[in-house]
Amino acid sequence: MSFIITMYVREGIVMASDSRLTLNTQQQSNDKTVVQIAVGQSDSNYKTFLAPNNIGISTYGAADINGVPIGGYIESFISEQLSDANSQIDEVPQKILDYFKKISNTLDTQFYVAGYKYTDGGQREQQVWHAWVAQNKVKRLNPPGQQGSLWGGEADICSRLLQPVGLLTPDGKLEQPLPHFQIPFQFFTLQDAIDFCIFAIRSTSDAIRFQPRPKTVGGPIDVLVIKPDKAFWVKRKELHS
């Protein structure tokens, strides 16, 4: 599993992701008890990619195909299907779906695709799309002209930080709501969006570290910024010796 986040504000779009690859295995003891084990295999996986025409792609869910990390397949998709730089943002999600369904139509992998499209009036419109291979679904997610955020993967920790919570009685009834301060995403600048994306992934990784659960989020954080006329990496892990 993973944790990826996409934020869209007036100035641009931010896409960020962690780097951990987790392998899920089963072990059976002598009494036939099956134990599910999740092992962090690598902290050097790429889950966010920059395609031609300043289009960003992030992935979460099933992270391998036939035992091979999915990152290599995404790079192949970009070079084979998007290399001519003529693909528009609203065409890419369906191309992703078609490409990966040919490999496996049951692949439980999901994608965020983000970028800009020229409108008839010559303006560039932000678009953020979701593609889900196993469900054969493509959907645009961002309402035109609004700011907001989307995340996928291990989202429970971030959701708890943002949603109203309270103290419960032993029988599970709400006893006392805790103070709740809603985050005004509509006022975020591009820098705020970058900072929040890093905060969300880091908070998820740090919380999982102390919880008795599989350590499915971790490693370096990659951060991609997409503006109407360009795209660049704020953080990107590099190969090294």
Image (spheres, rainbow, N blue to C red):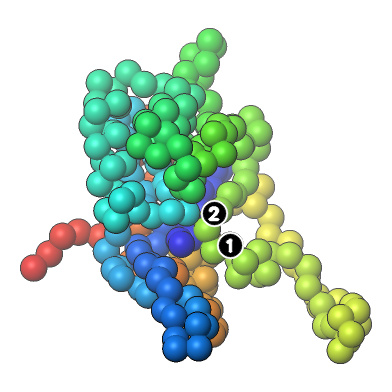
Q: Residue furthest left?
A: 241
- Residue at figure coordinates x 41%, y 22% from the top left: 88
Q: Which of 228 and 77 is in front in this view?
A: 77
Mark 1–mark 2 Cα distance, whole angstroms, equals 6 Å
In the rendered picture of this protein, how many numbered marks are placed on residues? 2
Q: Where is residue 102 in the image (x, y as percent from the top left)?
A: 37, 31
Q: Position of residue 35 (x, y in %)?
A: 49, 80
Is 192 placed left or right of 165 in the picture?
left
Is 182 placed left or right of 55 in the picture?
right
Q: Position of residue 69 (x, y in %)?
A: 29, 54
- Residue at figure coordinates x 56%, y 53% from the top left: 151
Q: Which amino acid does label 2 sit on?
A: Gly
Task: In the rendered view, tell whether residue 85 sits above or below residue 112.
Answer: above
Quadrant location of residue 138?
Answer: top right
> What is the number of the mark on residue 219?
none
Dot 1 falls on a residue whose secondary structure is: loop
Which residue matches tag 2? 152
Q: Which of 87 and 97 is in front in this view?
A: 97
- Residue at figure coordinates x 29%, y 26% from the top left: 81
Q: Residue furthest top?
A: 120
Q: Which amino acid does label 1 sit on?
A: Ala
- Residue at figure coordinates x 54%, y 11% from the top left: 121
Task: In the rendered view, tell whether residue 176 sits above or below residue 203.
Answer: below
Which residue matches tag 1? 155
Dot 2 falls on a residue whose secondary structure is: strand
Query: Disc 1, disc 2: CB below 8 Å?
Result: yes
Pointer 1 local density, CA inside 10 Å: few below 14, some 14–19, many at least 20: some
